[in-house]
Amino acid sequence: MSILTPIPRDMPWFARVLFSIPLLGWIARDVAFGHPENFWYALIGAAALWIIAIMHVGVVALYLPMVCLTPVCLIMLIVISRG
């Protein structure tokens, strides 16, 4: 599936929305339908982007993803404690 191929209608709506975003959709479509090693290339690219943000902005870029994941950890603790 190339970037010019229309998104199939039988896909869920959230996948169609994600694949239609210009840059992120291209990367997500390439990871989902491309070669298996594309996942690792995207992961290395995301890590490099994070390191560049840390070098440019500083400690704020280092801790911001952890602050954003705080609600996820809280929900996980609630789910674990409920059994």
Image: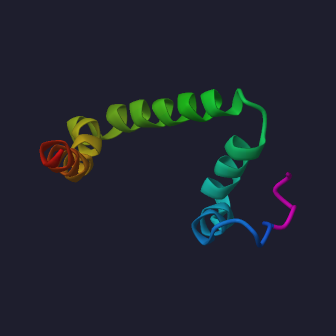
Is 16 above or below relative to 78? Answer: below
Front-lying residue, 62 or 72: 72
Instruction: Kindly give the residue lying farthest to the front in the view shown.
Output: 83
Q: Position of residue 19 (x, y in %)?
A: 67, 61
Please tell me whether residue 36 is drawn above or below residue 12 in the rendered image.
above
Q: Quadrant of the C terminus?
A: top left
Chief SS of the magenta region: loop
Residue positioned 30% across, 41% down in the render: 57
Q: Nearer the viewer, residue 62 or 2?
A: 2
Q: Residue 18: horizontal and vertical position, in percent?
A: 60, 62
The residue nearer to you, when weighing 6 against 73, is: 73
* The magenta stretch spans residue 3: yes
Q: How many marks?
A: 0
Residue sitting at x 60%, y 54%: 24
Q: Where is residue 61 drawn, in percent x and y?
A: 29, 41
Decide which of 32, 11 is in the foreground and name it: 11
Q: Name the residue: 38% across, 38% down.
A: 53
- What segment is highlighted magenta in the picture? 1-6
